[in-house]
Amino acid sequence: MSAKSLLQVKELRKQFGKQEVLKGITTDIKAGEVVCVIGPSGSGKSTFLRCLNRLEEASSGQILFEGVDLCDKKTDIDSVRQRMGMVFQQFNLFPHMNILKNLTLGPMELQKRSREEAEAYAMELLHKVGLAERANAYPQQLSGGQQQRIAIVRALCMKPDVMLFDEPTSALDPEMVGEVLNVMKDLAAQKMTMVVVTHEMGFAREVASRVMFLADGYFLEEGSPAELFGNPKNERLQSFLSKVL
């Protein structure tokens, strides 16, 4: 039996003024998949990702998440977002709160979990990413790589059904990239559904169950990492890979 569809995107279009960035994208993301979205800068990768949880409003089309149409104005998007973790290029941690407070704020305020439950789960996740001893530190006391690992844990504290990553390593010094990618690899091994916009081709090759190449407003090619990197068929993709590999 195949995995159930978690996210279904149908004819998604997004315009900024007269410029159409996404030109009718249709794709299906199944539970447990790790989908990496690659493509040239400015091709709309981040826009696509931000449309998935309506941080950007689609110009037209449908986005179904667990059967709920996110583009329907009657949909309570705030409750839906609690099931969609999002990790950005910038860490967006609250500087005036220590790490534990950053992690427990959402579960306590939005999901009405008790402090004990929220803190216990946060500490469990901090142990997993090797940062339990920094629970009482403040964001500015951590390196960029540590802050991004905390940002991932903050999203996981909400117990989401899918994790969206928008170039999570692009703001990091090169030596910190590995520690963040390792956390993401562990998540993939635990069958967390992930949609990852990334420039890290090695990560896409190693961890993705599917890679999608976005350029000129469309997914021009998609397939397994072996197919996409080993035998690209689209000329635009061949040209892109010749520059980045």
Image: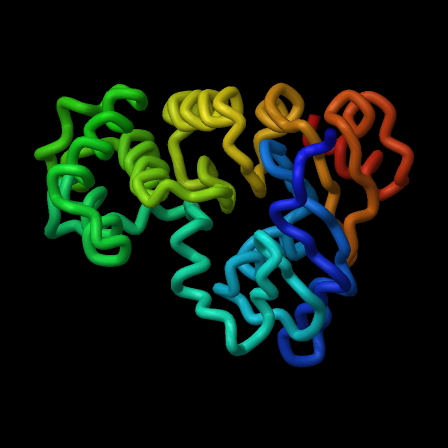
Left or right of 51? Residue 243 is right
Q: Which residue ends up furthest to the front in the rendered image?
A: 1
Along the viewing direction, whichever of 7 and 176 lies nearer the viewer: 7
Q: Residue at x 37, y 41 (%)?
A: 159
Residue 117 to residue 102: above or below = above
Residue 203 place in picture, x, y as percent = 58, 25
Residue 189 place in picture, x, y as percent = 51, 20
Q: What's the coloring here?
A: rainbow
Q: For the N terminus, give its image quadrant.
A: top right
Q: For the C terminus, give its image quadrant.
A: top right
Residue 123 place in picture, x, y as percent = 19, 29
Q: Which quadrant holds residue 35?
A: top right
Q: Residue at x 12, y 38 (%)?
A: 116
Along the viewing direction, whichever of 119 and 134 lies nearer the viewer: 119
**Number of marks in the rendered image:** 0
Residue 36 place in picture, x, y as percent = 63, 36
Left or right of 12? Residue 191 is left
Q: Residue at x 76, y 32 (%)?
A: 241
Q: Which quadrant holds residue 117?
A: top left
Along the viewing direction, whichever of 78 and 170 lies nearer the viewer: 78
Q: Residue at x 46, y 26 (%)?
A: 187
Residue 96 to residue 72: above or below = above
Residue 40 to residue 150: above or below = below
